[in-house]
Image (cartoon, rainbow, N blue to C red):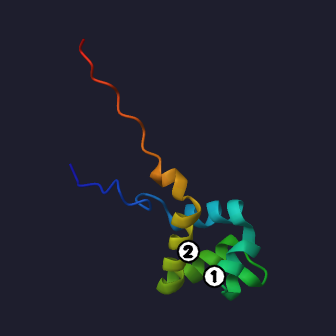
Amino acid sequence: MPHQNFKDPLHGVTLKVILGRLVEQVGWKGLSASIPVRCFMFEPTLTSSLRFLRQTPWARKKVEALYVKVFKKRFCAIPPKPSSSFS
């Protein structure tokens, strides 16, 4: 069984999903305000933004960091452990 890193909030999440969720949550204007790059500022599309982010590691890291920041509550939610009381 391969080792899985469950503490990494980006584990198993594609760049397309990350960008799509950010656009739904903060919109293109919010993205361009947080990360001022042309693909978010002028006629933004998911396709052109994905192409740019896949070719530009520094911008991708910023988008991933913004995703973690925006959805922080979702990552910090730890389900309660079931009680193991045998009384």
Q: What residue type is disc 2 on?
A: Val
Residue found at x 67% / y 86%: 36
Q: Which mark is residue 35?
A: 1
Category of crowding for the residue at label 1, using alpha-carbon neighbours closer than 10 angstroms: few (below 14), some (14–19), many (at least 20): some
Please provide percent x and percent y for residue 72. Answer: 52, 59
Residue 8, position in %: x, y? 38, 60
Q: Is residue 64 left or right of residue 40?
A: left
Please tell me whether mark 2 sits on a helix, a strand or a loop.
helix
Question: Residue 16, relative to residue 42: is it above or below?
Answer: above
Instruction: Of the two numbered discs 2 and 1 on the same chain, state the one appearing first in sequence.
Output: 1
Answer above or below: position of 31 versus 2: below
Q: Is residue 67 above or below residue 44?
A: above
Q: Position of residue 7 (x, y in %)?
A: 35, 56
Q: Quick one: 29 or 56, which is closer to the camera? A: 29
Local packing at callout 2 (Cα closer than 10 Å; few below 14, some 14-19, many 20+) is many
Callout 1: SS: loop
Of all residues, the one furthest to the right in this rendering is 43
Asked if residue 2 lies left or right of residue 10, the reply is left
Q: Residue furthest left?
A: 1
The amino acid type of the residue labelled 1 equals Ile
- Residue under the image location 42 percent in, 44 percent down: 78
Q: Which residue is mark 2?
A: 63
> Where does the image place residue 45, in percent across and percent down from the top left?
72, 74
Residue closest to the eye, 5 or 43: 5
Q: Which quadrant holds the C terminus? A: top left
Alpha-carbon span between mark 2 and mark 1: 8 Å
User: Measuring 64% from the left and 77% from the top, which residue is drawn there?
Assistant: 49
Asked if the residue under mark 1 is in contact with the one under mark 2, i.e. CB atoms within 8 Å, the reply is yes
Image quadrant where residue 30 sits = bottom right
Res 44 label: none
